[in-house]
Image (cartoon, coloured by chain):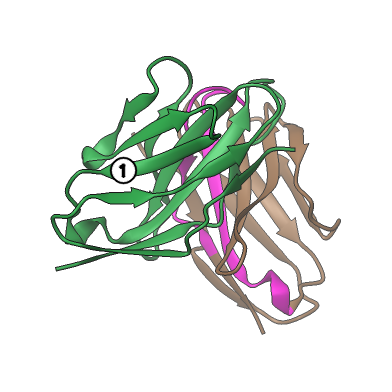
Amino acid sequence: KAGVTQTPRYLIKTRGQQVTLSCSPISGHRSVSWYQQTPGQGLQFLFEYFSETQRNKGNFPGRFSGRQFSNSRSEMNVSTLELGDSALYLCASSLVAANTGELFFGEGSRLTVL
Amino acid sequence: AQSVAQPEDQVNVAEGNPLTVKCTYSVSGNPYLFWYVQYPNRGLQFLLKYITGDNLVKGSYGFEAEFNKSQTSFHLKKPSALVSDSALYFCAVRDDSGNTPLVFGKGTRLSVIA
């Protein structure tokens, strides 16, 4: 069974640009969560989607947005990039949302903002 | 709001010695507790979880964790450390309401020295 796939794996942008990251969950998983990982802050929760609906949103500015499609694939977008947005963005999927099951993580998209 | 504290940024242990990585949590209601491990340039891998039942939970690669409700702790342990256990370890919690995301601590870097 294929795992969670994130694309692109690495990308470099400049301040003010925007970026879109993609996540394909494990087949059959309907819940997708996004996290931002930085050395100083650990993993910070961005969004959680289930069946195309945003269930939860973390404490990030409106420049961070996301969506989920009918096939459970998800994208997140960051507009007007800032230097502080440089991070590893991790996507995770699970069968259902907010349950007792574990999340399955992709290998992440590493964003560098210059 | 739920939160996780991992009081040690770094833990060093000699190969063959027992290891402990500490985690304390705060939730409203009952906690669902998880441990994950991250190897360099990789996503997070699930190690074990506590949902209910026996306070001692056994997981992958010989790891175990003990849930202590009175101390709101969920420390990760292993009787005999291996050099290959060197990695970044994350504790995570969600409550049992069904409405909250999985919240992670900032991580503890474990270094096992031969």
Q: Colour of chain A?
A: brown
Instruction: Give me the residue at 27% from left, 40% from top.
Output: B63
Check the image and name the residue furthest to the front.
Answer: B70
Q: Which residue is mark 1?
A: B77
Q: Where is residue A103 shown, x and y percent of the image?
A: 49, 36
Quarter of the picture containing the N terminus of chain A is top left
Instruction: Give me the residue at 41% from left, 41% from top.
Output: B75
Q: Can the viewer see residue A72?
A: no
Vertically, is B11 above or below A66? below
- Tell whether position A41 is magenta: no
The image quadrant that residue B26 belongs to is top right
Q: Nearer the viewer, residue B31 or B88?
A: B31
The region drawn magenta spans: A83-109
Q: Where is residue A23 shown, x and y percent of the image?
A: 56, 47
Vertically, is A95 above or below B84? above
Vertically, is B68 above or below A24? above
Check the image and name the residue furthest to the bottom.
Answer: A114
Q: Colour of chain B?
A: green
- The amino acid at mark 1 is Lys
Q: Where is residue B78 shown, x and y percent of the image?
A: 25, 44
Relative to A59, B25 lies left or right = left
